[in-house]
Amino acid sequence: MSEKHIYFVLVRPMYSGNIGSSARVIKNFGFHCLVLISPLCEINAESYKFAVHAKDLLLSSKIYQSIDIFIEEEKIDFVVGTTARVGGDKNPRRNAILSQFIRDLELPKGNIAILFGNEETGLTNEELEKVDLLVTIPTSDIYPSLNLSHAVAIIAYELSLNLRKSRPLPYRFSTKEERNILIDYLLELADIVLEEFGESRKRIYRDILFNWVNRAFLTGREVHSLIGFVRRLLARMKGLRFKKYG
């Protein structure tokens, strides 16, 4: 995968110096795309001071008013979120993989966005709804939150390790659209199987299914096979012939 397809996205950054420092570390590891979402500060002299030799990233950076607009305009295929606050059994959407696992992942083709929340609140639960994969950097329980630019540096480093040793593989990674079709069928199946459950409990299972599909890094062939399998299950459960269901 070419680095030009990876976007480092700062969501509501609060401090101009952090924007500059983030630009510096992004360029340190060979990347060039910096995006700001609804920044709460300006790119100013302080930003350029901290960017040092990465001023070109500040000059070429793009600003969008929302994550949705950015995803649509840049045709993003896969969204990675970052967080210092991990979830648990009651909030599976915040269950995250450790950052060091990035170096060994087979990253999907297409445009990838790495989202970083702002210095005080991080990414909100609503913003995490837009994420395909969530990553956390292992830190001390005493003070788990990193400075924004430090977090950007660690993720950029892990991605640089991944891209240097990546090699062509004899299969195609599934697209977001293919995974979404599978998720829709799984959610339909869950609604039938969990019919007697309350809505809050159903939502937990839905989030788990969402995480399962996106964390599995399924190939296109695997997704299509699973779609066919789940459709057959639904047809059997509804007492329909497979050719009439879909």
Image (cartoon, rainbow, N blue to C red):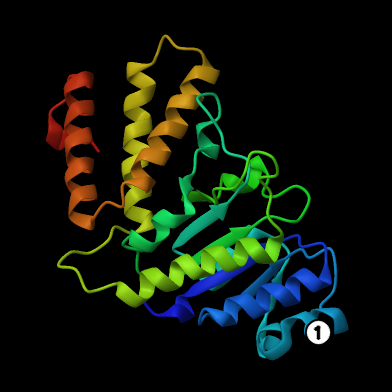
| In-image side of 41 versus 148 (left or right) | right
Amino acid on which disc 1 is placed: Lys
As displayed, is residue 58 above or below residue 159? below
As displayed, is residue 202 above or below residue 134? above
Q: Nearer the viewer, residue 138 or 23?
A: 138
Q: Callout 1: helix, strand or loop?
A: helix
Rendering coords of residue 171 (x, y %): 18, 64
Can you see residue 229? yes
Q: Determine which quarter of the picture holds residue 71.
A: bottom right
Rendering coords of residue 137 (x, y %): 55, 51
Rendering coords of residue 146 (x, y %): 68, 55
Can you see residue 44? no
Number of numbered discs present? 1
Image quarter (top left, top right, bottom left or bottom right) of the N terminus: bottom left
Question: According to the image, label 1 marks what residue?
Answer: 49
As displayed, is residue 210 above or below residue 188? below
